[in-house]
Image (spheres, grey):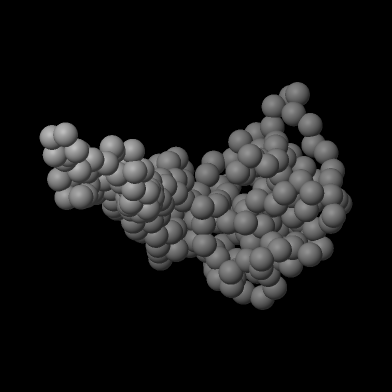
Amino acid sequence: MFLRGRWLVGHVLVVATSAAFVMLGLWQYGRHIDERDARREAERAYAAPAPGLGTGGRAPGERVSVVGTYDPDAEVLLRNRVRDGEAGYDVVTPLLRSDGPAVLVDRGWVSRAGVERGLDDLATPTGTVEVRGTVHESRPLEPDDTVDERAGRVTLPRVDVTRIAEGLGYAVHGMWITAQWQDPAPPSTGPKLPEPPDTDDVDHFSYAMQWFAFAAIPLVGWPLVLARRARRRPGRESAILAAEPTAEPARSPGG
């Protein structure tokens, strides 16, 4: 019954539709894999070895590696930093080096709520640490910029190396570093290091799962339609037979 006419056309449409949805899902999943691989490559680039900072100048944006010990007592906060739509601060800490002047390191982002709770749980690494990241030029404060205080730390709108280095009692390099990688790694409660920017704002994995779900709908729904149709047909045939008139036996003439 279901292998002819419009039923056969229905079978073909169901298979073709599901196959198309599966192909779209595989395409989206492929995009997800490509994006994941690109992100992993970017993360490896963040952690890749880099030359030392030295005592001379480096071009802004150049990656460098520095080794030393942090001075948490001289830590400052950069305010109005947003990450994933949430406002917070960047933590800037001097790193004392044995092979040159100290260098200011932006150790990463903390939420505003985290700062309000206090920064004691950020656990600034003790002992020798290695930091790899990009160097930046100092940006002097403007006359209308304010220097405030939050959670016992000075807060500024930007990294003014000269202003931050005032009263530290040791020389500070004229350029500062945005950390991309650190050993030992920051604690889970500590400042979050920057992450490579997304190459694509689309969540391809979610779209792939949606297409696969769409593919399952006709494959599940069509057999249910066929099963329902098969259950209804015997009753309908019985009703048709019952409605047909019964043939009377032929009578002989004059009977």
Above or below for 37 versus 225: below
Q: Which residue shows up at 84% across the image and 49% down it?
A: 116
From this viewpoint, is residue 133 visible?
yes
Image quadrant of residue 200? top left
Above or below for 48 versus 217: below
Q: Which residue shows up at 39% across the image and 60% down it?
A: 40
Residue nearer the viewer, 224 or 253 = 253
Residue nearer the viewer, 169 or 71 = 71
Q: Which residue shows up at 59% across the image and 40% down it?
A: 138
Residue 229: % across, % down: 34, 47
Residue nearer the viewer, 32 or 220 = 220
How many numbered callouts? 0
Residue 49: % across, % down: 40, 65
Q: Please state if 92 lies on the left or on the right of 204 as rendered.
A: right
Residue nearer the viewer, 102 or 106 = 106
Image quadrant of residue 129? bottom right
Q: Which residue shows up at 43% across the image and 59% down it?
A: 43
Q: Please state if 12 lies on the left or on the right of 21 as rendered.
A: left
Q: Where does the C terminus fall, quadrant-wise?
A: top left
From this viewpoint, is residue 107 visible?
no
Above or below for 84 versus 103: above
Q: Residue furthest top?
A: 144
Q: Please state if 209 lies on the left or on the right of 4 as rendered.
A: right
Residue 144: % across, % down: 75, 24
Q: Residue furthest bottom?
A: 127
Residue 23: % across, % down: 25, 48
Image quadrant of residue 78? top right
Above or below for 63 versus 52: above
